[in-house]
Amino acid sequence: MFKADVVVVNPTGLHARPASDFVAKAKSYESKVTIKRSGSETPAKNAKSIVVVLSMGLAQGDSIELAAEGADEEKAVTELAGLIASGFGEL
């Protein structure tokens, strides 16, 4: 399993469009990909579900933990964290 923490930088957080972009990218990996708030005791959830990602209500400044397990786990986490850190082209 490979994990990384990343901070949401979008001024409007992970609203519908960036959440959709994130989920589409997550679905492109073979690995199981999960997401949760950093430091939270809540179990990690499926990052390949738009309903899950939107229901988290992630706002600017929130720190999240991405994790993946599988053949392309390191690539999945690294690229998804980079996508979030880039601001999805909204900065």
Image (cartoon, rainbow, N blue to C red):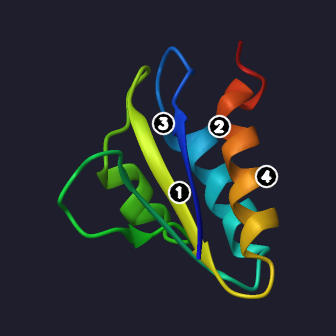
Residue type at tag 1:
Leu
Residue type at tag 3:
His
Instruction: Single out the mark in the foreground, 3 or 4.
Output: 4
Residue placed under numbered mark 2 in the picture: 84
Pick whichever, 4 or 25, lies toward us: 4
Residue type at tag 4:
Glu
Q: Say left or right for 5 vs 31.
A: left
Residue at point 72%, 31% (across, down): 88
Residue placed under numbered mark 1 in the picture: 66
At which x and y percent is residue 41?
17, 59
Residue at point 51%, 66% (across, down): 47
Residue 15 circle label: 3
**Mark 1 to mark 4 CA distance (whole Å):** 11 Å
Instruction: Single out the mark in the foreground, 3 or 2.
Output: 2
Q: Counting residues from the N terminus, which is met first, the one under dot 3 or under dot 4? A: 3
Instruction: Single out the mark in the foreground, 3 or 1.
Output: 1
**Mark 1 to mark 2 CA distance (whole Å):** 11 Å
9 relative to 67, above or below: above
Pick whichever, 55 or 40, lies toward us: 40
